[in-house]
Amino acid sequence: MNILLITRGKDPFKGHYAFPGGFVDYGEDPENSCIRELEEECNITGKQPELICVNGAPDRDPRKHVVTIAYHVHVDPTHEVKAGDDAATAKWYDLKEVNETYDMAFDHKDILRKFIGKL
């Protein structure tokens, strides 16, 4: 099984692996924000967001207290991904390898493990 990751193009955690994402705009539904951010960062359209978890530890982001709403999103795996917006790279990785060996930005490794626990 593969998972889509970016490498961050900006601090904090510049160069680290992370899930595509960003901030919810004022007045925007978080599920719509998830789909928008995926398209902005990876040039891929997603659908059917499914909640993985909500993480809100005050120290998870060094910039400020940020609450993460993490979703699993269905995408066409044959569609070519292309980094955009804040992402330096965007590509598919082997889920098992990422879980066992990759360091990730923020608390994204914790989110990954929560996702794996739901499989």
Image (tube, rainbow, N blue to C red):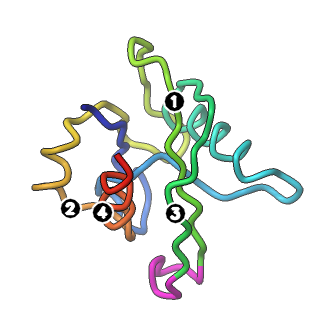
Query: Of marks 2 and 3, which one's residue comes earlier in the chain?
Result: 3
Q: Percent position (x, y) of residue 19?
A: 42, 50
- Residues at circles 4 and 3 in contact by the CB criterion of under 8 Å: no
Type of amino acid at the residue the image marks with label 1: His
Marks 4 and 2: CB-CB under 8 Å?
Answer: yes
Identified at 31% across, 52% down, the residue is 116
Q: Which residue is mark 3?
A: 53
Name the secondary structure under disc 2: loop
Q: Which mark is residue 74?
A: 1
Q: Residues within 10 Å of mark 3 (few under 14, many from 20)?
A: some
View extreme (top): residue = 78
* Res 50 → quadrant: top right
Choose mark 2 or mark 1, whichever is in front: 1
User: Which residues lie in the magenta part?
Assistant: 57-65
For mark 4, give the secondary structure.
helix
> Which label is found at residue 103?
2
